[in-house]
Amino acid sequence: MLLIDCPFCGQRPEIEFRYAGEAHVLRPIDPRECEDEEWAAYLYRRRNPAGDHAERWHHVHGCRRFFNARRHTVTDLFSGSYPAGTPGPECEAGQ
């Protein structure tokens, strides 16, 4: 079983969590004034690395809070987690 370290509750089994996408994706300030290409990039373009990656997770069956975590996408090993809205450590692949 995969264990995920919630920064608020500690280590819990993966069935308590839901993946919520790539972390640190910034929404355009005023979507009505951005170009179609910029809006499409925000909605659809995401990194898909084979390696260390910052992800957003939701602890749905626990504290119900969102947080960010670093996970190696090939091995599924988590290297750390931190509250959403705080800067995270740089990943090896360079994000």
Image (cartoon, rainbow, N blue to C red):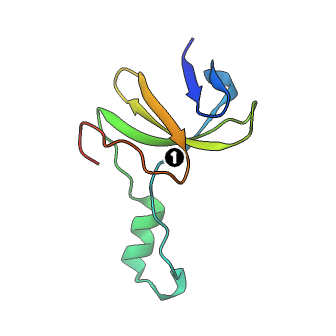
Residue reaching furthest to the top: 1
The image shows residue 32 at horizontal and vertical percentages of: 53, 86
Q: Say which residue appears at 49% left-offset and 51% top-offset.
A: 86
Q: Is residue 45 above or below residue 5?
A: below
Instruction: Write down the quadrant of residue 78 in the picture.
Output: top left
Would you name the residue on which mark 1 appears? 21
Q: Quadrant of the N terminus?
A: top right
Q: Is residue 88 left or right of residue 91?
A: right
Q: Say which residue appears at 58% left-offset and 42% top-offset.
A: 67
Residue type highlighted by circle 1: Gly
Q: Say which residue appears at 47% left-offset and 49% top-offset.
A: 23
**How many tags in the picture?**
1
The image shows residue 37 at horizontal and vertical percentages of: 37, 75
Q: Say which residue appears at 68% left-offset and 28% top-offset.
A: 9
The image shows residue 95 at horizontal and vertical percentages of: 29, 48
Q: Is residue 75 above or below residue 40?
A: above
Front one among 86 and 45: 86
Residue reaching furthest to the left: 93
Instruction: Write down the quadrant of residue 88 in the picture.
Output: top left
Could you say whether the residue bearing mark 1 is in a helix, strand or loop? strand
Residue reaching furthest to the bottom: 33
Q: Is residue 35 above or below residue 45?
A: below
The image shows residue 19 at horizontal and vertical percentages of: 57, 38
